[in-house]
Image (cartoon, coloured by chain):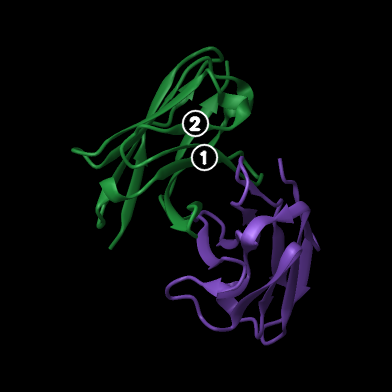
Chain colours: A purple, B green
Amino acid sequence: EIVLTQSPGTLSLSPGERATLSCRASQSVSSSYLAWYQQKPGQAPRLLIYGASSRATGIPDRFSGSGSGTDFTLTISRLEPEDFAVYYCQQYGSSPRTFGPGTKVNLK
Amino acid sequence: EVQLVESGGDLVQPGGSLRLSCAASGFTFSDYCMSWVRQAPGKGLEWVANIKQDGGEKYYVDSVKGRFTISRDNAKNSLYLQMNSLRAEDTALYYCARDRGMGVIKKYYFDQWGQGTLVTVSS
């Protein structure tokens, strides 16, 4: 099973700032089968990024994903008020599909 | 608009059973693999099970193998999760999620999610 580690656990930032979230895998994620999801309190997760760097339909271009192998990054170029949430990475190249523990982006 | 609506969650005693349902609309249900993903209170996400389009292939996380059964009825646009021998550690919000395939050898991420149904296992 591939274990995903996310850092930092919590990120305290202000609107307009840049957020950089890290996801590290215990072994290589084949063909960049890595996704990012956003979850707000009381809501279901929402797909942001798939294939490590492809934005899902309707996702603003301030969200970008990068990386390969074992190291992946989600970047939010300029935080909007609605971006304060928990972000999960997930690998789907190996079974079982696994999620990271999440990074909470909160208001500084 | 894609909609996934879960139901069936409840308070159940350890060792008990429960059947969750997910009603799908807004897309051709029979074209997609489907999954159940759960989230324990205040915790992260865990994939539980998935089923291929025709129901012929089913996969489970090790912790539920032999206890949970995923199924679907394409005529009713519905996904199910039969949960037996429930344990306290199965307490979670259970999401129905649509699988989206990527690559020549299809690998699946979750592109649509329902709002979840809460299962509480407690005496």
Residue B45: x and y in percent read: 61, 46
Badge 2 density bin: few <14, some 14–19, many ≥20, Cα 10 Å = many
**Residue at 68 percent of width and 77 percent of height:** A75
Residue A8: x and y in percent read: 81, 63
Name the residue at the front extreme. Answer: B104
Does residue B95 appear to the left or right of A86 in the view shown?
left
Quadrant containing the N terminus of chain B in the rendered view: bottom left
Numbered badge on residue B32: none
Pick whichever, A1 or A86, lies toward us: A1
- Asked if disc 1 and disc 2 are in contact, CB closer than 8 Å, the reply is yes
Quadrant containing the C terminus of chain B in the rendered view: top right
Marks 1 and 2 sit apart, C-alpha to C-alpha, by 6 Å
**Residue at 43 percent of width and 73 percent of height:** A57
Residue hosting label 2: B119
**Residue at 63 percent of width and 46 percent of height:** A94
Pick whichever, A22 or A28, lies toward us: A28
Residue B110: x and y in percent read: 48, 54
Q: Quadrant of residue A81?
A: bottom right
From where the camera sits, is residue B55 visible? yes
Chain ID, mark 1: B
Numbered badge on residue B93: 1
Do the residues at discs 1 and 2 belong to one chain? Answer: yes
Residue type at numbered disc 1: Leu
Residue A48: x and y in percent read: 54, 68
Count of all numbered marks drawn on residues in the image: 2
**Residue at 64 percent of width and 81 percent of height:** A79
Chain ID, mark 2: B
